[in-house]
Image (spheres, grey):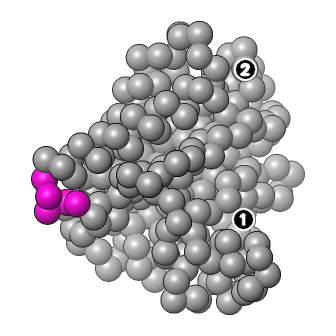
Amino acid sequence: MKLNFTGLSDPGLIRSNNQDAYYIDPEKRFCIVADGMGGHAGGEEASRIATEEIQAYLVENWQSPQSSQELLVQALWRANEAILQDQQNYPERADMGTTAVVVVFRDPESPWCAHVGDSRLYRLRNSQLEQITEDHTWVARAIKLGDITFEEARIHPFRHVLSRCLGREDLHQIDVQPLDVKVGDRLLLCSDGLTEELVERKIADYLQDNSVLEKAAYALVEAAKAHGGHDNITVAIVAVEEN
């Protein structure tokens, strides 16, 4: 299958710096989105370290006999260890951490995704947008248990509390999954700066109404800013096309 990639990151309208990071490798065919936290310098550093470490591990081991599943798990563990090491070297960044969502297309295997935190992967197919990843947050677990509704979760004061992120010694699991992808699909990796501002119906509209990927990315970011732009906004889009 033929893949087209694009990405865009914006600090939004409130924050003075951008603690998000993303990386796209159109040759190896993978992409990463990370959303850092932990103060002005810490969040930016955490997302940078995670993105660089994951990218480096994937490139170094792309031709290895590891499965895509193993490759992704080890890449994110490496990122976690690198952030922990940086915390030791710079105690003022001891509370920094980051989310990460990664998608790889590695022939002859099917595509795979790995994620930690609440940066998301969506799939748009036949005008229907589906969230593929499950947020590692307090509210996502509360929804699953039936303690709160989806509508309540959107405004809950704990909606930003992560149950899992990179940069923690108590990180014990990396979620990985194979992806069902067909020609005509679009995949969207994004930070919560997008999903906090736009409901999924609107995200689907912008994603499908722009045939040029760069225009779709720009439209999503600008729409999030028009709805407040309270956080950094990052999107990476993959279009699956005929060879």
Residue 150, position in %: x, y? Answer: 73, 81
Going 55% across and 26% down the picture, which residue do you hit?
71
Tell me where the magenta segment starts and ends, as one range.
90-94
Drawn side of residue 45 relative to residue 73, left or right = left
Going 72% across and 65% down the picture, which residue do you hit?
205
**Which numbered marker is on residue 205?**
1
For the C terminus, the image quarter is top right
Drawn side of residue 109 relative to residue 4, left or right = right
For the N terminus, the image quarter is top right
- Mark yes or no: residue 145 visible: yes
Q: Residue furthest right?
A: 126
Which residue is tagged 2? 109
Dot 2: element: loop
Residue 59, position in %: x, y? Answer: 43, 20
Q: Nearer the viewer, mark 2 or mark 1?
A: 2
Q: Identify which amino acid the numbered label 2 is placed on.
A: Glu
**Which numbered marker is on residue 57?**
none
